[in-house]
Image (tube, grey):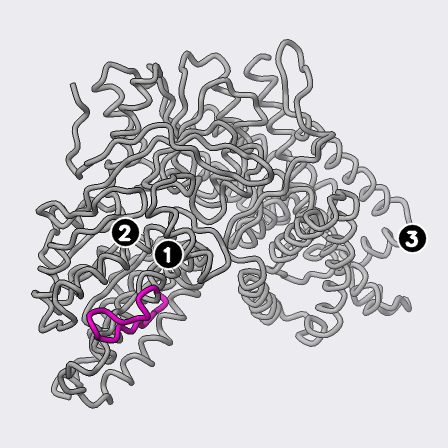
Amino acid sequence: MSFWTSQLLNALSFGALLFLVSAGLSLILGLMRIVSVAHGSFYMLGAYIALATLTASHSYPLAIVAAILTMLVLGALLQRTLIERVGSDPLRQVLLTFGFLLVVGDAALAMWSGSPAIIPVPPFLAGSVAVGSAHYPLYRIAVIFLGLGLAFVLDRVQTGTHLGALVRAGADDLEMLSCMGVNVRRLFVWVFAFGTALAGFGGAVGGVFLGVYPGVDLEIGFLGFVVVIVGGLGSIRGTLAASLIVALIDTLSKSLFPEISLFAIFLLLIVVIAIRPTGLFGRRSLA
Amino acid sequence: MAEGGECPKSYLSDIMYSKPNVPYTQGMIVLFRSAVHVVAAAAIACTAVGAGPASPSDPIKIGVILPLTGSSAGVAQDLLRGIQLAFSENGNTVSGRKVEIVTADDQNTPATALTEARRLVENDKVSLLMGSLNSSVALTLLPYAVRSQVPYITTTIAAEITGSKKSPYAFRSAAAAGQMERPLAWLLHRRGFKSVILMGSDYVAGHDSTGMVGAQFTALGGSIVKSIFPPQGDTDYGPYFSTLGDAKADLIYGYFFGGDTLRFVRQYRSFGVTQQLAMSASTISAAGVAQSLGKDVDGILTAELWSPTLTDPLTIAFEKSFQKAYGDSPQATARSGYVEGRLVVTAIGILKGNVPNGLAFAQALHDSHFKEPGGEMFSFDENNNATVSTRLVRWQFVDGKATGKVLETIGGVTQDWKAPR
């Protein structure tokens, strides 16, 4: 396999993974304009719950469903009982969700200890497939399809359904949407819960790739913010495009100039914010 | 207290000059936590009534400072359990004198560690400090221990502790940087590996560890094909492995830690990289990493001080005793803690339970000899660095359990060990 084919596949698979873990944040930050720094916590909890379910039941579907449902309920509760109270002030949102992140981080440490863990590769995805003359890991191929598939479904929902219309309307003008008689409060609980459930799903799937350990919440939260800011708020296409661009830059800088790989992502962030503060596909800036 | 007026200032300056090696947000939390500790510690230190000299009937107090919370908590607990076992085996009494362990949480941060060390020495009146899992923490505690004339024993690897910053009060009961790497490189070269790709996390330990393996390897006539330093916390190692396909090397040596190790090994496996993987000590054996890796651990070579698969009588006795105390089988970290504890027990035995001052305690530690799990006799060199046995270990995952099988052991490895010609 040529160098470029394999690096392109690396970029695609890492980009798909980035999309899986940041799609939920895109909804939460974009539609609801809630600056949730706790997004990585939901990823971490999703991964831990998936791993615990998997260990107990040896069933991958059950592990994924458990992660999604638990995060759905937790997200709805968090929105309904806490975030709703702080209103639209981003500073208070950050403080509240940061507190949540600390509590969850320490609770996870107490429950699952500090030992790093990684979710085993599902047996049917172990091994590799022939790509051209060489082999490429099968589960990475699966992540590519999963990420693109999820992006397609989310995009259809966002652009082609009534719920999607409400989401887009909310991203553009929240007060107007409320005046039109939409129960914004209920919509918010659902969208927030859906966003956290996506993060839980990202944890269950990404845990195979990235592992789960204390501190992964901050790392994932950081990557999510980069992707969402580059992509633009509330846009699924933007988030997908940003995931792929960030992954491509990350992959190429690692394989060509490994010393600057961390810096490369920041450079992208700086350039995008300087030239297009609303992100590549966004219409509204965070401020 | 005479120094009451200066107290808070000196605490503050310690915090301002420390540079915790943690991500920004985490750093902020640590800074905040440290601030709380400073206020609390300053209040205690400034109001405490000076305790009188310990009488022979009081217990000897041993201060153990470890990152008991945070991401290193698992490893810290393992080490602590090993230390405690060495004392509890004797009913926490040595030569008729009670021994009491006082623990403190350093949060893996030099400033917090120093505050806690002061609390232990100045309030709790401990006769000895032990602990830290982080070289920058150990290097912060060291000058304080020397100034306070309290012996300090650590298991961290920084060469300075028993090198340029050596002191009669400073001890290392485990391997220094290089004591694992150089023998490992020598053994691997002897087993027929001639060209190596070095991969290490992009921070001091990653560069040091891979550098020492590389230097030993080239000194023996081997070659370094490539050196790659991915950033700490890197999420995707695929791009690095994709560039190795046509590299003419027969060995990869990796130094990563915690979650990075998991991703590194998982992705090394999934890309079907053909080169043999060797990794640094404690990257695989620490904190259940090997167990989490499952089948992916098969065939990885590491250098270890000890392995639970050894069958010498002391290893078996240690495992039995550990199992009885904690209902769990010990890993390499717990054994390190146990050796550290045995060392202190032996030294107190030499002093017949009477610890007159720090220097006498330090001298007794220096003179301590005892058989350690693994079967060798524990001893220090003239710089108070432990002479260790370095074992080449092959990992395997059998019946749902990851174990390291010892292939070869080199005894008598000192800090300046040289490969036999």
Q: Quadrant of the N terminus of chain A?
A: top right
Q: Secondary structure at mark 2?
A: loop
Q: Nearer the viewer, residue B87 or B294?
A: B87
Q: CA distance from mark 3 to mark 2?
A: 62 Å
Q: Amino acid at mark 3?
A: His
Q: Quadrant of residue A174?
A: bottom right
Up/down of A251 relative to A184, above or below = above
Residue A280 visible: no
Residues at discs 3 and 2 both on one chain: no
**Mark count:** 3
Per the image, the residue denoted by label 1 is B79
- Residue B78 at x, y percent in the picture: 41, 56
Residue A40 in the magenta stretch? The answer is no
Up/down of A32 relative to B253, above or below = below
Callout 1: chain:
B
Per the image, the residue denoted by label 2 is B155
Callout 2: chain:
B
Magenta-tinted stretch: B89-105
